[in-house]
Amino acid sequence: MDFELSEEHRMIKDLMARFVQDELMPLENTVLAREASGGGYLLTPEEKAPIDARSKELGLWGLDAPPEFGGSDLPVMAMVGIEEEKGKTITPYTLPPDSPNLRMLMNTCNEEQKKQYLEPYARGELTSAIAISEPNAGGDPAGMMTRAVRDGDDWVINGRKIWVSRMGHADFTILMAVTDKAKGARGGISAFLLDKGTPGFNVLRRIPMLGGAYTYELTFEDCRIPASKLLGREGYGFAPMQQRLSTRRVQMAAWCTGMAQRALDMMIEYAPQRVTFGLPLSERQAVQWWITDAATKIHACRLMTYDAAWKIDRGEEPRNEVAMIKVYSTEMAWEIIDHAMQTFGGMGMTKELPLQMMANRVRLMRVYEGPTEVHKMVIARRLIGKR
Ligand SMILES: Cc1cc2nc3c(=O)[nH]c(=O)nc-3n(C[C@H](O)[C@H](O)[C@H](O)COP(=O)(O)OP(=O)(O)OC[C@H]3O[C@@H](n4cnc5c(N)ncnc54)[C@H](O)[C@@H]3O)c2cc1C
């Protein structure tokens, strides 16, 4: 195992670090103030446009997209470093295209769908969402009820989805639906491409989440789409969906490493300056141990994330390792950010520091892409099953 980044990949990571420092960090105070005053956790179009232009100019678009669509086709190992840098800022910005749906489209699109969806998506011209979760099937998506029934040359969809991110600006949505109830996740769940505004595809409500984020509840009422909107093989949508979730989980582990590193850096800078009861906080064993434990866990998390990425790049499917880093990274970042907030005392409780926003983001991450407890169950089942 050699986790040393190549010269080229190290340069891209450094470029990303500078982009975060120069373009995204300066917007943090504005973003925090807007969220604190109820204006949402977002960038305005006026703030986003110059960042889009700058990141495109720097060659940061399509980093893991195929070269035929103008992408750089970077391996997951290289993407981990880039995502870690991205995790250090709370300014909400996604370098186009968002990797998870890109991976799923690359694994499933036919030639016609490549032209209509994958190519413009890879070039950053289209945005997308994915609708898997339902009111009675979230942590256990195999229990989904939304049905797609074949009717001549069409599919007719009925059902309900919830907690769907990015719907506010998605040009199309990857929808998971049951096409054969008896087979369930083993040959009975399919993926579909739904364009924004398709009749019968309704956005029921926008749900405010922690930290100024939003998700959406959707209903499908006799939503009729042509057969050509089936994505991949009928009944076999679950496996590419799982691969998509794995892509996000590796990304999340890298974001958590970056976030935890920033919280640690803030603790290290502040603790020597703050004197209580005649001594700086950095002289207190409680704070020293928080710092030591944080550095140790960040180191472990970073290595585990590179290990999973290295295995994915070798063509393996390290599902246990990916589940482990999903759990470890989110729980680790939650603890380290909490200790950083505690170190800052009253200041750590304000909406003026990025720490509370980092805590909110990680709190969401402990649930989405599978809650901690579900991953632990799945890991244990695999381990016990192996014996
Ligand atoms: C911010 C955010 C964004 C999201 N974005 C999307 C999206 O874009 N698209 C989409 O489809 N979904 C999305 N989701 C949904 C998300 O994937 C689900 O919320 C998640 O999988 C949990 O499902 P659930 O809410 O139904 O919880 P449940 O499955 O009801 O679980 C509730 C709790 O029960 C416990 N639990 C559940 N099962 C077990 C078990 N077997 N053993 C032990 N404990 C267990 C866990 O603590 C879990 O948190 C998002 C969620 C959030 C919070």
Image: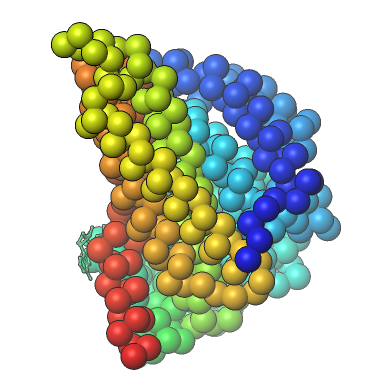
Q: Residue at x 32, y 74 (%)?
A: 378
Q: Name which quarter of the figure residue 124 lies in.
A: top right
Residue 131, quarter of picture: bottom left
User: Is the residue 292 above or below the residue 79 in the image?
Assistant: above
For the residue pair 240 and 266, the one nearer the viewer reads as 266
Q: Quadrant of residue 94?
A: top right
From the viewer's perspective, tell me whether residue 161 is left or right of residue 45.
left
Residue at 39% over, 48% down: 297
Residue drawn at (34%, 47%) of the image = 332
Q: Is residue 78 above or below residue 181?
A: above
Q: Position of residue 209 (x, y in %)?
A: 29, 39
Q: Camera-side residue: 220 or 96?
A: 96
Q: Nearer the viewer, residue 4 or 178?
A: 4
The quadrant where ligand 1 appears is bottom left
Residue 123 falls left or right of residue 272: right
**Is residue 382 visible to the viewer in this orientation of the structure?**
yes
Q: Whole-percent x and y of residue 194?
A: 53, 60
The residue positioned 66% from the left and 71% from the top of the image is 314
Q: Position of residue 191 (x, y in %)?
A: 51, 71
Q: For this view, does 85 lie left or right of residue 60?
A: left
**What quarter of the picture does the N terminus occupy?**
bottom right
Whether residue 129 is visible to the viewer of this picture, yes or no, is: no
Q: Indicate the quadrant containing the C terminus: top left, top right, bottom left or bottom right.
A: bottom left
Q: Is residue 191 above or below residue 135?
A: below
